[in-house]
Image: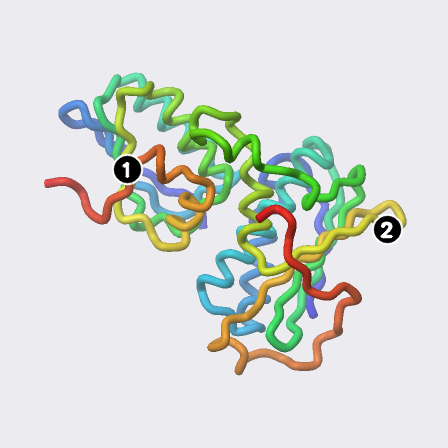
Amino acid sequence: MMDRRLRASGPGAFTRDIANLVADLAREAGLAEHDAYRLRLAADEITTNIAMHGYRGRCGMVEISGGVEDDWVWLLVVDEAPPFDPTHWSPSPRRAGDPVDGPVGGHGLFLALRSLDGFTYEYVAGRNRNMLWLRRSTADRSVGPRDSPVPNMGPARGGGG
Amino acid sequence: MSLHTRMVNEDGVVTIRLAGEVDSRSAHRLNELIIEAAAASPSRLVLLTEELTYLSSAGLRCLVFAHQKMGPGVEIVLVGTRPDVAETIRMTGFDRSVIMQDAVDQ
């Protein structure tokens, strides 16, 4: 299991740290390049959304931990911004028409939830807890530890896809 | 990895080579180039993306921005896009708004 506590402000504040953390986790889990890419994309979009909309560009804290459990890789992203459940956000209005005619933004959470194999959210003790799940491809499962701590939340399909 | 770019304007076609990553930290650089390209009033904008290794929603917003700055009559062509980046574009439906091809037209 790996933990990072990040404090930063502004769009893109966590992008580099997320890329490094996911790269480390992908190595530990033996993730295929494609799986590592979609886990990074999901984590990048979730944390960018926290920085831009949760903290509104002001300084804020994000704690990230990650691990490997059998055929699953998980990332837990915790922040202290106002409560926000990404699974209750609907991309439908933006997806209905030509993407270049609609609002410029709004695709990040859609990409995040579509890139994952599972996503759960809860608000506990004043903190948003976003759990990101990725199922390792069959070829990846021979690599990585089997004794990672088991998270309390089980894998569940994200609501944005 | 940061974003490296190179822009060429030739015969009414602006070509931008992208190498590295377009994310929320580097997207502003691409937007600056798009503004510069639009000022040349090209008939076509070609993005060479063989070396583009990562594209987040911030990069997708650059494509929207390019459409808005170039206007409806200007084709936007992505060449040699890697599978993971292409999947991001397709997931959000942007492949309907740009031309995606494997190689540059001869």
For the residues marked 2 and 1, what is the alpha-carbon distance in whole angstroms?
Answer: 46 Å
Quarter of the rendering containing residue A73: bottom right
Q: In the rendered structure, are the residues bearing label 2 and label 1 in contact, judged by CB atoms less than 8 Å apart?
A: no
Quarter of the rendering containing residue B100: top left
Please name the amino acid that badge 1 sits on.
Answer: Ile
Left or right of residue A115, residue B88 in this image: left
- Disc 2 is attached to a residue of which chain? A
Q: Is residue A113 above or below residue B61?
A: below
* Residue B23 or residue A89, whichever sits in front: A89
- From the top left corner, tell me how far across and down residue A135 is, in percent: 57, 67
Q: How is the image coloured?
A: rainbow
Residue count near mark 1 (Cα–Cα under 10 Å), binned few <14, some 14–19, many ≥20: few
Q: Secondary structure at mark 2?
A: strand
Q: Is residue A71 above or below residue B82?
A: below
- From the top left corner, tell me how far across and down residue A61 is, in percent: 75, 45
Q: Secondary structure at mark 1?
A: strand
Residues marked 2 and 1, same chain: no
Q: Which numbered dot is residue B64? A: none
Q: Which numbered dot is residue A124? A: 2
Residue with the mark numbered 1? B99
Report the residue at 53% width, 51% height from top: A41
Report the residue at 59% width, 63% height from top: A134
* Residue A159 or residue A144, whichever sits in front: A159
Please name the amino acid that badge 2 sits on.
Answer: Val
